[in-house]
Structures are given as C-alpha cells and as structure tokens.
Image (spheres, helix red, strand yellow):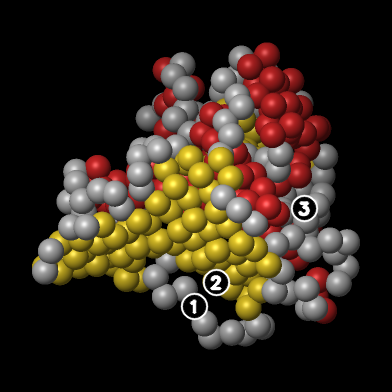
C-alpha cells in the first residue's frame, strides 16, 4: 500500500459519507470533516471516528498537516474550494461534474497548475466491472462497430431541491448525465463530436420547488455522435410524479451489428452475441476505495491521476454543447477550446 495520507473531507452529505468511508477503506486517515451544517458534520465524524469537525472549509484546509482535500459540495462550490485548496498547496480530489462553466474550469486549471499539485475527479463508475465489460466487448469488436450506447435515468423530483436549481446543480443534464457521458467516452475511447438534444421542465408546477428562483431543465432526450462513429443516446427525467412506480427499464445498453450487452439488475448483465445469450454476474466492490487507492498511488509515484482536469473539461464541453443544442433546437458541434 502507499503511504498513509491525511485527508480533509469537505461536505458531509451522502457523497461526503462515501468519501470518508472510501478513504478509510483505502488505508488513509480522514483528519477532519467540514460542513456548514455542524450537526451533520458531527454525526458523520462520530460514525466514522473522525477527530475534527469544522464549519469553515478554509479553516480545515489551511491546517499544515492536511495532504489531500476531498470535495463533496454542490456544484457551484467546486471551483472556489479547489482554487483555495490549491493555493494552500493541497492535492485535490473533487466530485463530478468538474464545475458549471468553462470560466470556472479555467480558474481551477490555473490554480492547480500554479500550485503544482495533483487533481482528480470522482468518476468512480470507471472502476466498476461493468464499465470494463462494456469497453472490452466494444474494443474487441465482439458487438461490431459502430455501436449505439443507450442510457436512461428516470426519477421523480429529487429530495435535494438544489439539484433542480438553475443557479445551483443545474439539473440532471449537468448533474447526472456526466456519468453516462464519461462512460461513453471510456467505452468508445473517443471524444464527442456533435450533440443534439431537446429539453423541457416537467416539474415547473411542483410545490416543493417554488422557493427556487429559476428551475433547471429536468427532462431531456440527448444524442451524441463521437469521432469514432459510435453514438450515445440518453433519456433523462427528474420530473416524474411523486411516488411513481416507473423505473428505468435498462439503465445501460450497448447494441451493435454483431450483438449487444445490457444491464439486467442485481449486478447481472445480459450478453447477446449473434443468436446466443449469456448472463454475467459482476461484483465491483467499493468504487470509492478503488479510486482513492489509485489517486494515492499516483501521488506516491508522481504520475498524473488518469481522470483529471482534461477529462473533466471534455465532459463539461459536451454538457455545454447539449445545453446549446436545447436552446438552438439544432445539432451543435462540441467545442474543445483548451490545451
């Protein structure tokens, strides 16, 4: 194992808890947890045996004994906390998506480069065996090429209403589609070229969202063409009726001229090659533990973490293209205006 690093986890919501647990499972010490909701922070600290609790992220990050800052905050805080942490000489691991705009991404890049610290972004799905399975079948040509990757995410209004805030997490197109966008990029081993999307706000009359100044698009149909010739297609909605029984029938399915692979639920995946059928059972373990272990190894050996600023910016570029397409009502080119 690598040396034991000392971690400051910023944010103690559902993802913050996973970060604390993942770092500990990977053999590292979570020194502190930080949240403006001190009660939440104290509960997480008690549950995982963390010694220090803070309400101010600057105070926790500035401690000289902190090696890594692990950011699990709403989207609008990713950039300022990253910039501050880098300025303190700390390595940064930040949840996805990278941030909400190209301008903020540029600020993050400048701060990380100037400080000479490592940066990783939390696309933990990359460590799941299903991502490996999809990639293997596509890259080995078992399904033929090109392929179509269908993804689906259907839910009622999210309990955390900030997810629906145009000025907050910017809705599912920003918040959840990045998972599929990164998975498609991984499986195709290619960058997105064109995006076409249509979006709506299904939950505009929901009482639980009336406090928000402006609602983000919560429902969309998205098609993305890749340089490889493959296509990703996403149907997403966070605007279904309360307590709906509707669920995504198949959250992920890859189809090609020679066969297909699809999620069957319960860790099972159905493989269809020609006229044959096979069911594969996959157990991926704790994905956060895996990603943090690799991040630590990269620090040990001074090698770049494989999912960093460039990868986060590529996904942001695609997301921004999807929003432009929804606004324009036409296909748009994905623009990568960074080095």
Q: Which residue is mark 1?
A: 247
Q: Residue drawn 69% across and 27% down?
A: 106
Sooner in the amino-acid sequence: mark 3 or mark 1: 3
The alpha-carbon separation of the residues under discs 3 and 1 comes to: 26 Å
Residue 262 against residue 337 in the figure, above or below: below
Sooner in the amino-acid sequence: mark 3 or mark 2: 2
**Which element type, helix, strand or loop, lies under badge 2?**
strand
> Is residue 248 in sight in this rendering?
yes
Q: Which residue is mark 3?
A: 168
Q: Which residue is mark 2?
A: 154
Going by the image, does 243 lie left or right of 271? Answer: right
How packed mark 3 is, by other alpha carbons closer than 10 Å (few <14, some 14-19, many 20 or more), is: many
**Residue 60's image quarter?**
top right
- Asked if the residues shown at circle 2 and circle 1 are in contact, with their CB atoms under 8 angstroms apart, the answer is yes
The alpha-carbon separation of the residues under discs 2 and 1 comes to: 6 Å
Q: Residue drawn 82% across and 39% down?
A: 56
């Amino acid at each position: 194992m690598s040396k034991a690093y000392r971690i400051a986890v910023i944010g103690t919501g559902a993802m913050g808890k996973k970060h604390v647990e993942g770092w500990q499972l990977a053999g590292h010490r979570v020194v502190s947890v930080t949240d403006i909701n001190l009660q939440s922070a104290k509960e997480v600290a008690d549950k995982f045996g963390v010694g220090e609790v803070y309400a101010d992220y600057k105070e926790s990050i500035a401690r000289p004994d902190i090696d890594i800052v692990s950011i699990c905050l709403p989207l609008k805080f990713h950039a300022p906390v990253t910039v501050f942490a880098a300025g303190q000489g700390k390595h940064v691991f930040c949840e996805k998506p990278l941030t909400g705009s190209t301008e903020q991404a540029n600020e993050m890049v400048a701060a990380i480069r100037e400080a000479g610290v490592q940066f990783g972004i939390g696309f933990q799905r990359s460590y799941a065996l299903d991502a490996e399975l999809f990639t293997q079948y596509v890259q080995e040509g078992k399904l033929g090429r090109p392929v179509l990757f269908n993804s689906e995410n259907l839910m009622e209004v999210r309990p955390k209403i900030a997810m629906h805030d145009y000025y907050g997490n910017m809705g599912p197109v920003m918040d959840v589609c990045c998972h599929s966008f990164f998975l498609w990029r991984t499986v195709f081993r290619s960058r997105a070229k064109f995006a076409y999307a249509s979006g709506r706000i299904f939950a505009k009359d929901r009482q639980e969202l009336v406090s928000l100044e402006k609602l983000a698009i919560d429902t969309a149909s998205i098609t993305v063409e890749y340089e490889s010739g493959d296509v990703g297609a996403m149907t997403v909605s966070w605007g279904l009726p309360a307590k709906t029984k509707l669920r995504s029938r198949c959250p992920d399915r890859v189809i090609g001229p020679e066969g297909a692979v699809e999620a069957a639920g319960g860790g099972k995946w159905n493989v269809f090659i020609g006229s044959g059928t096979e069911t594969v059972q996959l157990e991926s373990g704790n994905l956060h533990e895996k990603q943090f272990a690799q991040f630590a190894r990269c620090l040990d050996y001074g090698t770049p973490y494989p999912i960093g600023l460039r990868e986060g910016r590529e996904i942001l570029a695609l997301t921004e293209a999807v929003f432009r397409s929804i606004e324009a009502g036409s296909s748009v080119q994905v623009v990568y205006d960074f080095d």
